[in-house]
Amino acid sequence: MQLPYYIDLLGTLVFAVSGALAASDKNMYRDIFGVTFTGFVTAVGGGTLRDMILGVRPTWVVDGNYLIAITLGVIIAIIFKYYILKYRRTFFLFDTLGIALYTVVGVQKALFYDVAPLAAIIMGMFSAVMGGVIRDTLINEVPLIFKKEIYATACLSGAAIFVLLKLLNVDDNMNSFISVAVIILIRTISVKYQLTLPKVGSKKSA
């Protein structure tokens, strides 16, 4: 088992925590099934769509370790939810770490199946954000990629860094660490300093 496998498992666990926490923070999803279901689809949503595009079976279907990781994530969210939700920065950390890990895994898997580099970058971003989109939709929130925060752009940047370093024959483990760090750094700085992308708006009528 190589590092990408463990990164994928960790990302699955982290996203399960993120999804379960988001659901438990909503009155309509306080029951155990709603929390578990939201954690599950958040954890596997992006990866499942990625694998469907690649024409392969989703990893959680063929490897029971992913279901174990999801279960652990939901349990962590349930046991420590009051502490984590009290400190919103902790929730932010889980979500940011999740998108960073899933971006790298998505790019790696796309390149493994001989996807073109540019398409691999997009697929890395797609893998990372779709779980969050599904999560936010289920809990009646506007998905983060449609808000002013720099979210998907951070994933695209990290994915591009990974592909570039891959072309430069940088060790995969070091490449993964650097790319994950870039995504976390961009996301953290953008939120801390409220940095946003230029808006596209209509002109005001006279």
Image (cartoon, rainbow, N blue to C red):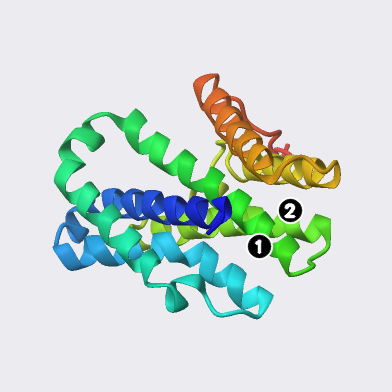
Q: Is residue 200 in view from this perspective?
A: no
183 vs 132, nearest the viewer:
183
Q: Is residue 86 above or below residue 138?
A: above
Please report contact status of discs 2 and 1: CB closer than 8 Å, yes or no. Answer: no
Q: Residues within 10 Å of mark 2 (few under 14, many from 20)?
A: many
Tell me which label, 2 or 1, sits earlier in the chain.
1
Q: Residue at x 82, y 55 (%)?
A: 118
- Please state which of the two labelled residues, at mark 2 or mark 1, is closer to the viewer: 1
Q: Which residue is mark 1?
A: 109
Dot label at residue 181: none
Residue 162 position within the rendered picture, expressed as x and y whole percent measured from the top left: 72, 44
Q: Residue at x 70, y 63 (%)?
A: 110
Q: In which quarter of the view is residue 112 placed? A: bottom right
Q: In which quarter of the view is residue 187 placed? A: top right
* Kind of element beneath mark 2: helix
179 vs 34, nearest the viewer:
179
Specify the amino acid type for callout 1. Lys
Q: Residue at x 75, y 61 (%)?
A: 111
In-image side of 173 versus 10 (left or right): right
Q: Is residue 172 in view from this perspective?
A: yes
Q: Residues within 10 Å of mark 1 (few under 14, many from 20)?
A: some
Residue 182 position within the rendered picture, expressed as x and y whole percent measured from the top left: 63, 32
Residue 195 position within the rendered picture, expressed as x and y whole percent measured from the top left: 60, 25
In-image side of 75 versus 187 (left or right): left
The residues tagged by marks 2 and 1 sit, at their Cα atoms, a distance apart of 11 Å
Q: Which residue is mark 2?
A: 121
Q: Residue furthest front?
A: 1
47 vs 21, nearest the viewer:
47
Specify the amino acid type for callout 2. Ile
